Image (cartoon, rainbow, N blue to C red):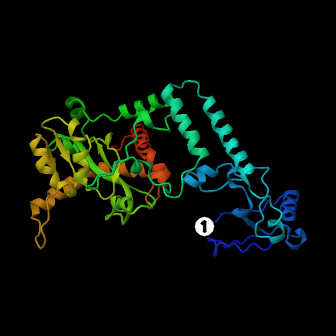
Amino acid sequence: MVYKWCVVPQCTNTTISSPHKLFVSVPTNPKRRKMWLRLARRDPKSILAHTNVFMCEDHFNMEKDTINYLKYKMGFSQKILLADEAVPTKFHCQEDRRSRLPDAGPSREVFFKRQRIDIVTECLRRHSTTTHTESLQNDDMIQEIIEPKDEKSDSDISCFESGLLSPFGATSVKVTDSDSNVTDTNENIEKLQCLKNTLRLIEKKPDVYWNLPIAFRHNYHNVSCIIDCLEIDIQKPSKALHQALTWSEYKKGNTVKYLISCTPNGLVNYVSQGFGGRASDVTIVENCNFLDGLQQGTCILADRGFKHLEQILHEKGIKLLRPPSVNAGAKLSKTEVRQTKIIASLRIHIERVIRRVREFHMLKQHSVINTNICRVLDHVIIIACALINLQDSLIK
């Protein structure tokens, strides 16, 4: 990593002392460079024209002075981009300037509150197709912006506060279309519903059979879907209960867990709602509506982790196909080893689907999701899987 230090006098921030701070490069344009340095009270002649120097984020209003601040914070952009008219305006590190700053009294707070109201009202005015229910939601949104939550809530996962924590560890983070602040128009709800409709669990048997890959057609023609679980890393919640319910022993961190199903040719046909990372694979299958959409006589291909699901599926007339279990100190027979290799070669399709999900920057491996975004994570997964279905086939 390149060592950077803030060129503003009396500012001690560096990439070593403040590794989490952003450092903005001072423009190379002579006029802008001279203006920036003079605003910082740094003599322009003391720095060579071709020297690359930086100023830290403490001297800017990052939300106003940058073009892609929100995308950068959410992980959609690798580089922060400054607006053309951006200049450093904050110099709290300099004592004589700090004393001249106006006191943020009540009148100043009221001004900023009114400014936030105007911004939200203007955004809401652009959507003319609103209902009475949506107007109530918009009022709540404005109220939430005017009166930020206290530190007690600590921006925890909003669905946790709504009582969706299950005592046995299946933490649902489902967000319905009717109460989502993200889908604030009927048009957006219809679009999301169209994406959901592309993930159809029940398919006609002739359609599934005639689209089976060659590897399935001889001995595994009854396989209708392949299942596995996907875990998305999230920030550590502040409450101990939420930390326990989202802790994943497999990932060694706090996660939200999803059950994903695909057809033998790699088409995603089911995504569950989110559960806490503590929930086991079998617990998720039992508490989502996946089994309700399966027809009697079908066959599911899964990993060894779903072995306790066999009894439940047997009662519903559904067969579970998985690799043979390995007992401690015992060895597999040649037949079992051969069967394990065959099933592993067939299960690779769900692994490829999960790999495609991970190609989205927000859902990459070890990309930690902010707790404020967890309320819409179900929608994010649905959209990602629907877009995957529009890509080229996994089987070539």
Q: Is residue 271 left or right of residue 307?
A: right
Q: Nearer the viewer, residue 205 or 56?
A: 56
Task: Kindly identify which residue carries mark 1.
Answer: 20
Position of residue 17 measured from the top left corner of the image (x, y, whole percent): 64, 75
Position of residue 272 measured from the top left corner of the image (x, y, whole percent): 32, 44
Q: Is residue 231 left or right of residue 291?
A: right
Q: Nearer the viewer, residue 319 or 74?
A: 74
Query: Which residue occupies 74% across, 62% down?
Result: 59
Q: Amino acid at mark 1?
A: His
Image height of 208 relative to 107, above or below: above
- The answer to whether residue 186 shows anywhere in this view is no
- The answer to whether residue 247 shows anywhere in this view is yes
Query: Which residue occupies 60% across, 53% down?
Result: 72
Q: Quadrant of the C terminus?
A: top left
Count of numbered badges drawn on the protein? 1
Position of residue 377 measured from the top left corner of the image (x, y, whole percent): 43, 47
Q: Nearer the viewer, residue 149 or 298?
A: 149
**Label 1 crowd (10 A; few <14 / some 14-19 / many >=20):** few
Q: Nearer the viewer, residue 38 or 121?
A: 121
Query: Which residue occupies 86% across, 68% down?
Result: 41
Position of residue 104 measured from the top left corner of the image (x, y, whole percent): 74, 56
Image height of 326 relative to 306, above or below: below
Q: Quadrant of the N terminus?
A: bottom right
Q: For numbered disc 1, what is the local secondary structure?
A: loop
**Toward which corner of the image does residue 176 lie, by quadrant?**
top left
